[in-house]
Image (cartoon, rainbow, N blue to C red):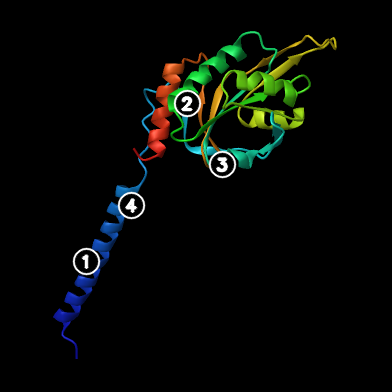
Amino acid sequence: MKNPSNTAFIVLAALAGVLALSGGMFAASHLFAPATLDSEQMGATYLEGGRAVTDFSLVTHEGQPFNEQDFHGQWNLVFFGFTNCPDICPTTMIDLARVQDSVNGKPALRTLFVTVDPDRDTKERLAAYVPAFHDSFTGVTGDLEQIDRLARDLGIVHVRHNENGEDDYMVDHGSAVLLINPDGQLQAIFQAPHRPADMSRDLQKILDHHAGR
């Protein structure tokens, strides 16, 4: 017959072991959990955890297919505009060139100009326009339906003013710059006005956070 005191001791020892293991697992989970980015002092809107981007099918100014899978593997800055834009687009592209240079290739960062005027912004026109601001920039065009699909998903509104069918028309469009992470998720939104120094600071903070620094 077992000694009651020995049985109680065994039960208590087993319980202590379970509690110790649970406590260790709890501590480990908190020790190795990724820290939350402190975005209080940032001008950019940071989306904790990122947000998935819907599927789409477009083409680059070099004639290469471009879809949601092409966001993967590097960081991407995305700006929607059109080559006939008189002010906001060229100004923003100049600012983005400064931001691109500030990152200096570590980690990989690609800047994309997605046209909201595909009827006029052909691959050839984008090839002449987009790399003029920075030789690493990529222009993106394609069917308006597919552009609309991506624009809506990223919160960009655009309205074409060509009710009279004239060729010299304007397009109103959102001026935000979107940051897509290497997992293909929308990670941050940079609203206008865009100040290269502030954008570079916020961008570097996000990149460092994701690199674990």
Would you say residue 81 is visible in this rendering?
A: no
Crowding at mark 1 (Cα within 10 Å: few <14, some 14-19, many 20+): few
Q: CA distance from mark 1 to mark 4?
A: 20 Å
Cα separation, mark 1 vs mark 2, equals 46 Å
Residue drawn at (83%, 10%) of the image = 166
Amino acid type at circle 4 is Ser
User: Between 198 and 21, which is closer to the camera in this rendering?
Assistant: 198
Q: What residue is rendered at 43% in x and 34% in y?
A: 106
What's the mark number on residue 72?
Answer: 3
Q: Earlier in the sequence, mark 1 or mark 2?
A: 1
Q: Quadrant of residue 24?
A: bottom left
Instruction: Give the mark, 3 or 2, whose residue is nearer the N terminus.
Output: 2
Amino acid of disc 3? His
Residue named by callout 4: 29
Rounded to the nearest whole Å, what is the CA distance between mark 4 and mark 3? 28 Å
Q: Nearer the viewer, mark 3 or mark 2?
A: 3
Left or right of 127? Residue 76 is left
Above or below, 19 against 54 in this view is below
**Which three-letter amino acid code belongs to the residue tagged 2?**
Thr
Q: Nearer the viewer, mark 4 or mark 3?
A: 3
Tell which tag, 1 or 4, sits nearer the viewer: 4
Secondary structure type for disc 2: strand
- Residue 7 picture quarter: bottom left
Badge 4 vs badge 3, beta-carbon distance below 8 Å: no
